[in-house]
Image (tube, coloured by chain):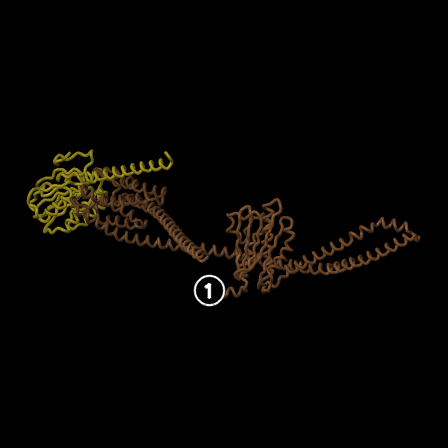
Amino acid sequence: MNQLNATSKSITSQTSMDNNLHASELLMARADEIFRAQRQRRSARTDRMFALLMACQWVMGVLAAIWISPRTWTGGTSEIHVHLIAAIALGGALSAMPIFLALRYPGSVLTRHMIAVAQMLTSALLIHLTGGRIETHFHVFGSLAFLAVYRDWRVLMTATAVIAVDHLIRGMFWPESVYGVLTATPWRTLEHAAWVIFEDIVLIHSILNSVKEMKQASFHTAQLEETNERIETKAAARAKELESAQMQLLHSEKLAAVGGLAAGIAHEINTPTQFVGDNVRACRDMFGDLERMIGAYQSSLANLRSVGTTIPDDEQLTSLEAEVDLDYIFEDAPQAFEQTLEGVDRIRSIVSAMKNFSHGGSADQKTTLNINEAITNTLTVARNEIKYVADVRLELGEIPDFEGYLSELNQVFLNLFVNAAHAISDANPERGAIFVQTGFANEEIEISVTDTGCGIPEDVQSRIFEPFFTTKEVGRGSGQGLAIAYQIVTERHGGSITFETAAGRGTTFVIKLPSRPASENVLVAAEANSA
Amino acid sequence: MTHSKRGHTGLAVLLLVWGIAILAGTFYLMDYSGTPGTRGDAVEQWPTETTLERGPNEISIVMFVHPQCPCTHSTLETLNRILAHTVADDVGLYFVFRIPPGRNVVWARSSLWQKARALPNAKIYFDMDGTETERFGARTSGYIVAYDQSGHLRFCGGITPARNHEGSSIGGDALAEVISGKCHGETMMSAVFGCPLFGPDEVCHESAQCDK
């Protein structure tokens, strides 16, 4: 048994660890999900920001071209300047693609990298149009800072690669376009690239920190969600328990009211039953006297007839005697009296059982009771539910008196008997059997109730003690019976209730009640815990 | 082919077309910026018949300007920078604003004119019939000729590295050398970037050495 307990504890501990691991994995997965969703939203938002920025850049570029070089001149004639055409067409083309992607595929990886490419090409175009003015190079740095809003260092890498390649190629073939000089050494490109990389380092460091904070925030959000969910689950469980307690209270109150009514009715029935019984008994005795008297008369009449004495109205007497069938009356009437008295006794015992069942002590105070008597009384009360479907076999052992709540235990037994009867009626078209056994061992009173019913399906076995759980049709079961029984046995009396079942063969419920008072048990348990 | 695959292919084609268009536009722009205007042939000795009043014993710098040419702004800026950074004792600065037929002086008083007259000791001439412009062989706005103290041509050409591009260039460096008196060898020349000073229907004056 100890080994079994140790194994059980080990399994429980392992299960607990597995559950914790699973919960932790779920939490991490949820945190990751929140982080990804947040980053996706941020990327989509930044895409839209860039769409607006690029549209503004394009408009500003066109306006600048109109302002600075609207027309080019050849002598006295003029035409639209190539720079204005470039600002409209090339600038428009540069802006159109990222704007399209930002609106069509917001938040996608391709969109942000294409925006980075287009933004850097816009910088390159600006640098070129301003003749490599060093001030225009600040557009590159500003764009990198804007691109950092994505919080994706890869976007900066793309932008850096584009601007580096642009500077390298133009530095080699058109240095005046990027540096404003006719000749430029590769070191010039390296110098520009170094400044960009310097900004990249600062921005990437900032991005990584920001991403770390976002992940932490996502984790905290996931934790908060989990806590909320746990609280809600707990609150729902508490609400269910409260509802269960309310139902139980209502049930108890109803039972108490019915019990009180039954006790009153029992008292009312008991009194007439008493005098009916007494009178029947008196009638039986008087009938015996009458029978003796009539026997004496018949004997005297027979003597007189035998000596030839004329008896007045003898013929009428003989005829009447034949008519009333005195022999039958003398033979049948005593049986009728006995049966009537037996019926009265049965009424008395049923009424007594009902009184005992319904007035089984105070609900708040324990009383000394005999479990066997409680079972017998409850069986009497439940007889009507059982008698048509099953035979009851009792094997009541020698058990000590018990300190407990009688009415509650009666309720437990009644629930088990009624359930057993229902299980049998569900399973057998013919009569089944309910076997009730009591005994005492290891300081425990053990009560077992076995039926030959349908058994409990495996998939519902773990739920039968849950409040409001029932497999019975509506109106036949409330789902409260076993839940109440479990609560009464375990919480009110410190005992245990278990079951063994086999599909199609029946179920055995076993109740074990500690023979010492429940309060003492609680004390013993507390000492064991402190040890 | 699924709808998604078709979408991806379409997007890839779109990106390719976009990239090609951007590249083509960029190359066209580069080509435009890097294509110089006609330089013309400058006269080797300061022309005596010119109306430009040259001071004695000075280094004379003459710049020819189309009054509305946007590219010439960068030439003026560059010239301003060269003059500011070059130590010179006696430099005469002349701007010849060539006014095309049908235009007047009011039209020529543009932002370029304002910028030119803001330079110290600048003398501005409006060349109504293009005589002076043709005399010095100028064909493109931004064209500069520099003569030394003896009136001998030392430099002719532009001083920007490309069209509308400020910054250092061969022409700019050469002009700086002339101004600082370091140049005593052959006449230096460079490409000039700017608007043509004459329209296609205008005929060069016979006295000028037009480069057609």
- The answer to whether any part of residue A379 appears in the image is yes
Q: How crowded is mark 1: few (under 14 residues within 10 Å), some or many (20 or more)?
A: few
* In front of the other: B146 or B16: B16
At a point 25% along the width and 41% down the height, the residue shown is A83
Q: How many marks?
A: 1
Chain A, colour shown: brown
Height in image: A62 above or below A25?
above
Q: Is residue A251 visible?
A: no
**Relative side of B211 to B11, left or right:** left
Instruction: Give the percent coordinates (x, y) of residue B118.
Output: 19, 50
Q: Indicate the quadrant containing the C terminus of chain A: top left, top right, bottom left or bottom right.
A: bottom left
Question: What x and y, as percent, mark residue B14?
Answer: 32, 37
Residue farthest toward the front in the current orientation of the protein = A307
Q: What residue type is labelled 1?
A: Ala
For residue A527, side relative to residue A370 (left or right): left
- Please state which of residues A141 and A523 is positioned toward the viewer in this rendering: A523
Indicate the colour of chain B: yellow
Q: Mark 1 lies on which chain?
A: A
**Is A285 in front, or is B40?**
A285
**Residue placed at 13% from the left, 34% from the top?**
B206
Q: Left or right? Give the position of A411 relative to A164.
A: right
Residue under pointer 1: A528
Q: In this view, does B87 lie to the left or right of A458?
A: left
